[in-house]
Structures are given as C-alpha cells and as structure tokens.
Amino acid sequence: MINNFFNYKVKIKDTPFVTESGIKYQTTAAISFLDENKKEIAYVELGFIDCEDIYQLIDKGNAINIDECYVENFSLEDYRTSRNIKKKTFIKLHQFSAFNTFFDSRVETDFAHAEFDDSYKNFENAQFLNGALNFHSTIFNLGGLNFSNVLFKDGNVDFSNAQFGNGEVNFKNSWFGNGHKNFQDAHFGEGDVLFTNTDFNNGDITFINSEFKSDRVSFKVARMGDGKKDFHFARFHCNELVFEQTEFGNGKVDFRTVEFKDAKVSFNRSIFGNGEKTFEACQHNGGKITMRKSQWGSGNVSFEQIEFHKTLVFLDNADFGTGNLSFYNSHIMELSLKSCHLDYYVDLRLANCDYLDLSDSIGRDIIDFKPYDFPVAIKTVNFSGMRLIGRVYLNWNSNDVKNLIYSQTATSRREKAEQFRILKENFNSAGQYDDEDKAYIEFKRNESKANLHDSIKRNKISAIWQYPAYGFKMLVFDFMGLYATSPLRVVFSNILIYFIYAFLYTIIPYFANTTLNSVKPGDSFWMRFWDAAYYTGITYFTVGYGDILPIGSIRYLADITAFTGVFMMSYFTVAFVRKILR
C-alpha cells in the first residue's frame, strides 16, 4: 500500500500489460507517486481498462475480473444513464474481483445500489486514489468481502445501508483518509467482521443503527483520528466484540443505546482521546464487558442508565483522565473499579448492583453514593486498600453501609476493619459525626476480632488468656460505652453497675462474716439494700461522708467500687466531651 504520497500522475502507454493471472491489456497505466517536493517516491504499472469495457461485461452478465488494473471514473450512475436505466435500480455484478486495482475519480467512484453475486468479492490491496467512494445500499450477498490492505484516500466513504451477507467482511490493515466513513444502517451477516489494525484517520465515523450478527467483530488495534465516532443504536448481536488497544482519537465517542446482547465485549487497553464518551442506556443480556487498563483522556464519561442486569463490568486499572465519570441510575450485576485513579467526580448512584469493587483505587474528588430521586440499591461495596484523598458522599442508614461491608465474603476481618476506618475518616471530614461514630464502632469491633484471631493463629496456647481478655474488652469498651461514642450508654452502664454493687453489699453479709456498720441484726432485706445503695453511692462517686463504714473483708469491695466509679465517670466525661466538642 502506498499512502504517504502528496500527489500522483498517471500516464497511459501504448504497451501491453499482462497480469499475474494471465489477462492481457493493450495499454499500460504508469503511475508515479510524488512527495511534497515533486520527487517520485514510488512507481507502479498496471493494465488500463476503460469503464465502457467494464460496463459491457455488466451488460453481458460476464465475470468481472479487473485485477491489477487502473480504472478511471467508474460510476454505476453513469452506467444507468448510458443504458437508460432508472436511478436506484440494482445492477448485478458477477464474480467481481479487483485485487491490487487502482481506482481514480475526479468526483466519486460509484458502486451504489450494486448487487454482487454469491462469489467471493475481492478488493484486496486496491487503492482508491482520489474522490469519494460510494457503496450506498449495495448488496454483497453470500460469499465473502475482502477490503484488506486497501487505501481509501481522502474523501467520504459511504457504506450506508449496505447488506454484507453471511461471508467474512475484512477491512484488516486498510487505510482511510480524511473524510466521513459512513456505515449507518449497514447490516453485517453471520461472517466475521474485521477492522483489525485499520487506520480511520480524521473525520467522522458512523455506525448508527448498524447490525452485526457474526461470531466475531474486531476493531482490535484500530486507529481512529479526530472526529465523532458514532455507534448510536448499533446492534452487536455477535459472540465476541473486540476493541482491544483501539485508539479512538479526539472527538465524541457515542455508544448510546447500543445493544450488546450477550457478546463477550473487550475494550482492554483501549485509548480514548479528548471529548465526551457515552455508553448511556446500553443493553447487555449477560456475561462480561472488560475495559481493563483503558485510558479515557479528557472529557466526561457516561455509563448512565445502562441495563446490565446480568453483566460483570471490569474497569480495573483504568485511567479516567480529567473528566467526570457517571453510572447514575444504572443496573449492573457486578462493577469493578479496582486500582483506578478517580481524580474527578464519580457518580455511583446505581439503581441496582450486587457487587461494587473500589479496592486499591485512589479517590481525589467526590465519589457519590447518596440517594436523591431514587433508592441506591448496592448490596456490597469493597473499599479495601482505597486511598481516599477526596470524599465519599454516603449515608450510613440510607446506603445501608454496615451491610455493604459485612456482606463481603472474600475479605478478612482486618480488611473490613480497614474499610470502616476509611469511612470513619471520610464521615469526619464531611461533618457526618453520627455516621463517623457508627463506622468507628464497627472498625474497633473488627479490629479486636482480627487481633484475637491473629494472636491465636501465632500461638494456639494463647487462646487460654486471649479469649478472656477479648471478652473483658468487649464488655468494658463496647457494651458499656460503644467505644466512648455514646454518653447515654455510659450513663445506663453506670446505673446498672451501681445497682450491682448495691446488691453485692446486701447479700455478701448473708454468706460471710462481714457487713456495713449501719446494718442491725433484725433489719429486713430491703432495709439492708437501701443502706447498701446509699453506701454504694457515696463510695462510687468518691464522696465518702464516713457515716457508714465497711467491716471485715467487704472493705476490699469498697476499694473496687471507688475505682470503678472513678473509671466510669471518666469514661462518661470522655464520651460527653467528645460529643460536645464536635
């Protein structure tokens, strides 16, 4: 393929030319390709065939083999005019082959409303040197179609409304110049569709409402230049759709309302340029869509209102550049944003999602989960290893944060504790102090259990003292005060402890030779209890009037009572002040 020329000139020579297949032409087309300095950079000789000779082959219904020929101003519109055939009448072309053929036109090479027969259609290595190319409403029928290694020089290329039949459609390694590449309303059959390593260059690319029914559709390593890439309403009813390492260039990329059916879709390592990228309202019936290590350039990225109820979407290690990212009101079975750089606003207010993975990602701006005009139904979120520089908009109750993390089956207690710690710090920076306390409680609970399990794992014998120590910590730190987050819980704990001590001072004298000096032998249980309650109060709160004194071993219980009172009042002070200062 010669695609780096600036200009060219053609000279028709009166010398015969014989193609490799043995077809002889009386004249030769000598084509010189020139650079900007009019220096020849390539030279090609081909057989020269007049368009009228091709038209006569069409008239007779003969096979059309124009391999290795130079064809100038071919036009089926001119053919209809010369034969008084109505416009848009389909013209049948039999056994068409244009291998290594050079087409040249001042305006347009026109194959519009052609109907190729079922034989293999070969344009391999063909070069369309000048002017537009029109295959509008062309029917290719069965067989296959080979446009591999073809040069489509600058000018519009129109395959709109084309019917490609069930054979393979091959545009591998082809090179499109600047201009509009139009495949709108094209229907691809059951054969593979290959745009692998195709260079589309600048200009709009349109696949609006196109339909693919093949086993495999591949745009792998394709390069698209500046201009709009529009797949709006396209139907990829295929088994495999590949955009791996595709370069989409600058300009809007539009996959709105595309039907992926149940295709295995891959955008791995694809590179998007500057401009809006939208997959809004796409549909997928189940399976995987992978976009790992994709790069999204600048401009907003929208996955809003997509219908992926049974689909797993993987965007791991993706770089979303400098635009906002939105999954607003979408239905996705599982969404993975693992190890992503989320530098701008991310809308994760999904209408439904079973599992969302944000592990090891970096959030530098707002990550929004807060419901607004519809409930956000996310069952599980993994925040493990997340570095949150920005802020997560989340509500403990309406987002059911506790269940988001506890529903994780693959994370350890240590990892759950770390996630609650991340959310605790996030709620603090957002001023959501009640939610911060709830996250802190769950953090400490999981951390305690993780420490217990780790200690026993290192030394199984340590279970003898680790379990009692763990139980004591849970009683004092968790049950009695919720880790100093609830002053009211501490007050109720004080009241409960107060009456426990009062009860002990009442019943111990019945079983041991010890008592309070205010107790008389004939006093009833309740008289003893109220004396014990009074003594407990002045000891617990360290007042110590001295009107009632312990006698015997019960004095040691008095020491413990005083210590407990000091401790619990300090506990209350910490919890109360913590609430007030915030």
Image (tube, rainbow, N blue to C red):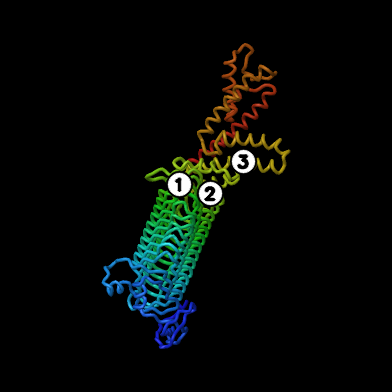
Mark closer to the chain start, 1 or 2? 1
Q: Are marks 2 and 3 in contact (CB under 8 Å)?
A: no
Between discs 3 and 1, the one toward the N terminus: 1
Q: What whole-number distance in Å separates the C-alpha atoms at marks 1 and 2?
A: 22 Å
Task: Tell me how many marks there are.
Answer: 3
Q: Which residue is mark 2?
A: 383
Q: Name the one closer to the observer, 12 or 471.
A: 12
Question: Left or right of 513: which side holds 45?
Answer: left
Residue 255: name its quadrant.
Answer: bottom left
Callout 1 secondary element: strand
Disc 3 or disc 1, which is closer to the eye?
1
Q: Is residue 434 visible to the viewer in this orientation of the structure?
A: no
The amino acid pointed to by label 2 is Phe
Which percent across, then down, holds residue 501?
60, 25
Q: Establish if 226 lies above or below 539.
A: below
- Residue sitting farthest toward the bottom: 14
Front residue of this view, candidates 202 and 335: 202
Label at residue 309 = 1
Depth check: give the residue in front, 375 or 421: 375
Seen at 69% across and 22% down, the residue is 552
- The x, y position of residue 451, in whole percent, is 64, 42
In the rendered image, which residue does mark 3 sit on? 448
Q: Given contact means CB atoms under 8 Å apart, are the residues at marks 3 and 1 in contact? A: no
**Nearer the camera: disc 2 or disc 3:** 2
Which mark, residue 365?
A: none
Marks 3 and 1, Cα distance to the nearest angstrom? 38 Å
Inspect the image, locate mark 1, and give the three-letter code of the amino acid beneath it: His
> Of the residues shown, which amino acid type is indicated by label 3?
Ser
Judge the density around disc 3: few (<14), some (14-19), many (≥20) Cα neighbours within 10 Å. some
